[in-house]
Structures are given as structure tokens and as C-alpha cells.
Amino acid sequence: MILTCGAVSRSFLHETMPIITTLRIDKSAQMNIAVASRFRDVTDIHINSLLKEDILDEGSPDETRVIDIDAETKLRFVPFISRFGALERVYFGGKNQRGENVEGFSSADAYFFEEGDMYPYEASWDAMK
């Protein structure tokens, strides 16, 4: 919403944009490259659309959590974050089926899968300490 407003409102562009230092992205479509450079003071970006969590057989003894990487976000995030000159930190996460944030996950079997490829011992930063 803020990214869209910055593209169409002159007063928003000059008065509000300079005081925005944190952006939260919940959908890949919100990563608009054309508007991103107008946020010259952004130091933190939370991209909550990279991971998608699905819970299979919820509540049963066979409950399984499946974490997938969103392909659209994967394609857009590098060009998007490269537009922010003052950027210091980027947080990657996702949303589960209930709309709650998923940040800092670690797979139970110590393996991470992406498009059929397996990466052993990939986990969250906290799990690696």
C-alpha cells in the first residue's frame, strides 16, 4: 500500500517517504522496483513472502510442516533490495496458513529442500549458534 501511494501522491512522496525507515513486504507483488528508489531512508526490510508454510494433518500425531520457497519472491527480491542505498538489514520470512509470521525456522531432519535439491545442515541463524 505504501509503495503504491508513493507512486501516485506528490505530498506523500515529499512529506512521508523521508521518515519511513522500515518496510514490511507480505506479497511478492509489493516489491515494485520503479517505486523502491523513492524510499531513500529505508534501513530495514522485512520480506515476509519468501517462505510458505503448509501444515499437513494438523493436530494429529502425523502432523508435518512443509516449508516452500515462493518462486515469485525469489525472482524479485534481489533487484528490489538493490534499489535501497541506505539499506542495512534484510529479514526473510514468510506466512503460515493462519497468516502468522514464520521467521527463523530449522528443519527437524537438518535438511533443506529447494526444487528437488537437498542442502544438508541449512537452518536458521539461531539454530547454528
Image (cartoon, rainbow, N blue to C red):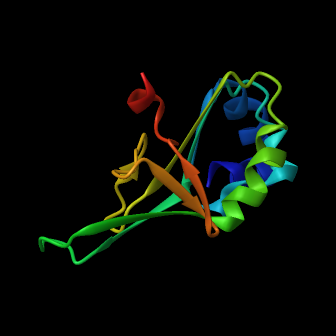
Disc tally is 0
Q: Position of residue 9 (x, y in %)?
A: 76, 49
Compared with 74, 55 (above or below) is: below
Q: Nearer the viewer, residue 119 or 125?
A: 119
The quadrant where residue 92 appears? top right
Q: Is residue 66 left or right of residue 34?
A: left
Residue 4 in sight from this viewpoint: yes
The quadrant where residue 82 appears? top right
Compared with 9, 55 (above or below) is: below
Q: Position of residue 58 (x, y in %)?
A: 20, 73
Q: Identify the residue at image location x=76%, y=39%.
A: 81
Compared with 99, 110 (above or below) is: above
Compared with 47, 4 (above or below) is: below
Q: Position of residue 8 (x, y in %)?
A: 79, 55
Q: Nearer the viewer, residue 75 or 21?
A: 75
Q: Identify the residue at image location x=40%, y=28%.
A: 126
Q: Identify the residue at image location x=87%, y=51%.
A: 34
Residue 29 in sight from this viewpoint: no
Quadrant location, the N terminus: bottom right
Q: Nearer the viewer, residue 9 or 7?
A: 7
The quadrant where residue 88 appears? top right
Q: Identify the residue at image location x=70%, y=57%.
A: 74
Q: Nearer the viewer, residue 43 or 10?
A: 43
- Furthest toward the bottom, the residue is 57
Q: Position of residue 112 (x, y in %)?
A: 52, 54
Q: Is residue 7 left or right of residue 15?
A: right
